[in-house]
Amino acid sequence: MGAYTIQKANWELENAVKAYLYKDENGNYVMRERDRLPLYLQGAPGVGKTQIVLEVAGNLGIGFVSFSLAHHTRNTVLGLPVIDGINGTDQEKCTRYTMSELLAAVYEEVKKGHKEGIILLDEFPSCAESIMPIMLQFLQTKNIGRYALPTGWVIVVCGNPPKYNKSARRFDAAILDRLRLIDIGVSSRDFLKYAKERGVHPHVIRYLELYPDNCFRYGQSEERSELITARGWENLSETMKVYENLELKSLTKS
């Protein structure tokens, strides 16, 4: 199957989450836990992966927590070690771990009333080597140590293909078999439709209509790297709007 457009990826993700959270007349989830595979959004930097997940959570009215795994260590993911007695006695001791920061954030959302939601793990292929085994176990069992992800929460991971990120791992078939991959492609037509719906600055839209190949560009040489993304165009649009409101002029026009 080829890469999805942004709209198709949004549609696929939303339908998958709806199916995962669908209940029978007795309030039980219809899909078995083992069949609710973590969803893996893969695409170029700035293509809109995080925004897609945030929109789906908003559309479905469910909870949302997000983490960038590139910024986490073994202690924050696994929890802090504590010495504890076995069976409540001090005769024999073992090392246990406090709750992971990832799961603690989800449990905080559950306390606020979000019994269902999405936990987004960004930069999944680029996480530290020390936490990758923990993450792979979490994707498979939905547990970190003694603590389990609440049943109504869905795991979504995001990442860039190795082509765009030297630190990104290339996963083998055994790992990918435990994930539901949604591969997002780059389309200028797709982004222009999105940009018009979101009120991106008309000058940006007009430029990309004239030069659609500049919507997304990636290149790398010994001297420099070049990356132009949808995120960059949106940022430029917002900057231009603020400049106009402040009546700031560019140096080229002064």
Image (cartoon, grey):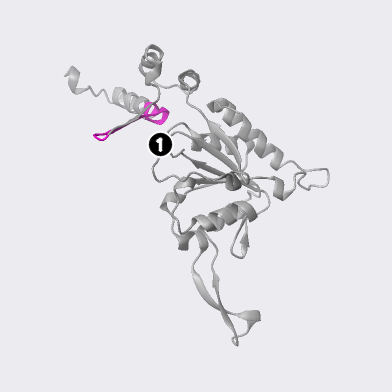
Q: Where residue 196 sits: x, y (%)?
A: 47, 18
233 in the magenta segment:
yes
Left or right, 53 with respect to 236, comes to right
Q: Is residue 87 above or below residue 14?
A: below
Tell me the amino acid under the disc marked 1.
Tyr
- Is residue 175 located in the magenta-colored stretch of the structure? no
Measured along the vertical axis of the image, is residue 245 above or below residue 56?
above
The answer to whether residue 171 is visible is yes
State the residue position of label 1: 164
Task: Specify the quadrant of the image occupied by residue 206.
Answer: top left
Percent x, y for residue 29?
Answer: 76, 46
Q: Residue furthest left?
A: 254
Residue at horizontal 44%, vertical 44%?
Answer: 168
Q: Quadrant of the N terminus?
A: top right
Range of magenta residues: 222-234
Which residue is more in the foreground, 238 or 76? 76
Residue visible at 49% across and 22% down in the picture: 194
Q: Position of residue 162 (x, y in %)?
A: 44, 40
* Residue drawn at x 55%, y 33% as measured from the top left: 183
In this view of the protein, which residue sits in the foreground, 194 or 114? Answer: 194
Question: SS at mark 1?
Answer: loop
Quadrant of the rendering where the C terminus is positioned: top left
**Which residue occupies the extreme front position in the image?**
173
Does residue 105 appear anywhere in the picture?
Answer: no
Position of residue 209 measured from the top left corner of the image (x, y, whole percent): 41, 13
Is 36 placed left or right of 24 in the picture?
A: left
114 to 216, vertically: above or below = below
